[in-house]
Structure formats: structure tokens, C-alpha cells
Amino acid sequence: MDRIQVELEKNDLSGGMADANKVIDLKPDGFQGYAERAGLENKKGETDAALADFDKALALNPNFAEAYACRGLAKRHKGDLDGAVADYNKAIALKPDFAFAYFNRALAKQAKGDPEGSFADFKTANELSPGKYARPTKTPVFPPGN
């Protein structure tokens, strides 16, 4: 798995995909291979394939907060804002200090037209991970598509 992360950081998506596929071949009942491959597919813009692999990972491990949050990203990119918020909610329920999930739920809420909810989540993300997420001084406005 570490090698897949290194390849992802180097933007070697094809190498990462090959490694993720090997992990799945070696351990088809393991959730991590599917989650890693889904992340790569999402980065490549293969959202439907990513969603299918996130679903498989979550069927194998329904307590995998990171997979819910990343599936939320894929859903948000497809325009399924309600589905994205539901996945972020599940991720936060499983991991209440998950700043990434709060931040992305803030983006989905903003896109849904809920600036107050967005601001609250943005603030929580910043409190949980100071300096990683910009601190808004008023209700944030995000560009379309974020």
C-alpha cells in the first residue's frame, strides 16, 4: 500500500493502478486494495469506477471513515450533493475528529446553498487541523464546482 501512495504522490497513476490491481488479486476480500484503486480512479476522472470500488471497499469494511469521505468527493464531483453530505456525515460519525470530512462537507453544503452549515463545518475543520484549511472571517463563498 505504501508503494501505491508513493506512486500517487509522484502522479504515477498507471503504476499505482497496476499495484492496486495486484493487491486486489492477492487479497480480493481485502478492503484496502479497492479503496486505493478507487482513489486512483477518482484522480483520473473515472468517477463511476471509483464509486463502484468505494462501494466494494465499504461492503468489506463498513467502518472505514476515509472511504466514506473519499466516496463523498466522487459523489460531489458527479453533482450528487445529498449523497456526498450523507457520506461525509457517516465519515464524521465514525471519526469525529476527521477535519478532511468536515472541510469537504462544508464545500458540499456551500454548493447546496447552505452557507451557515458550510461556515460551521469550515470552522470545525480549521479547529481540528489549524492552518491546513483557510480560516474564513465571514461566511465563505467558494467557486462553482468546488
Image: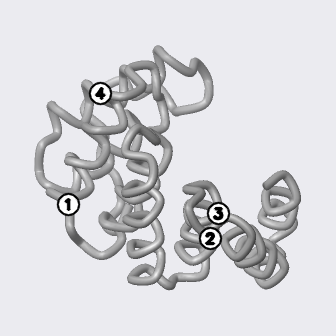
Which is more N-terminal, label 2 or label 4? Answer: 2
Q: Amino acid at mark 4?
A: Ala
Q: CA distance from mark 3 to mark 1?
A: 26 Å
Secondary element at tag 1: helix
- For the image, the number of numbered tags is 4
Q: Position of residue 77 (x, y in %)?
A: 36, 71
- Label 2 sits on a secondary structure element that is helix
Crowdedness of circle 2 by 10 Å Cα count: few (<14), some, many (20+)?
A: many
Which mark identifies residue 81?
A: 1
First reached walking from the N terminus: tag 3 or tag 1: 3
| Whether label 3 touches label 2, CB < 8 Å | yes
- Expressed as whole percent of the image width and height from the top left, the position of residue 68 reads 39, 49
Answer whether labels 4 and 3 touch (C-beta < 8 Å). no
Few, some or many residues within 10 Å of mark 1 (<14, 14–19, 20+): many
Mark 3 element type:
helix
Residue 20 rendering spot, x and y as whole percentages:
72, 71
Residue at label 3?
Answer: 33
Q: Which residue is mark 2?
A: 37
Report how far apart the C-alphas of labels 1 and 2 lie in the structure: 23 Å
Answer left or right for 146 relative to 89. Answer: right
Quick check: 113 left or right of 77?
Answer: left
Q: Give the Cα distance between marks 4 and 2.
A: 24 Å
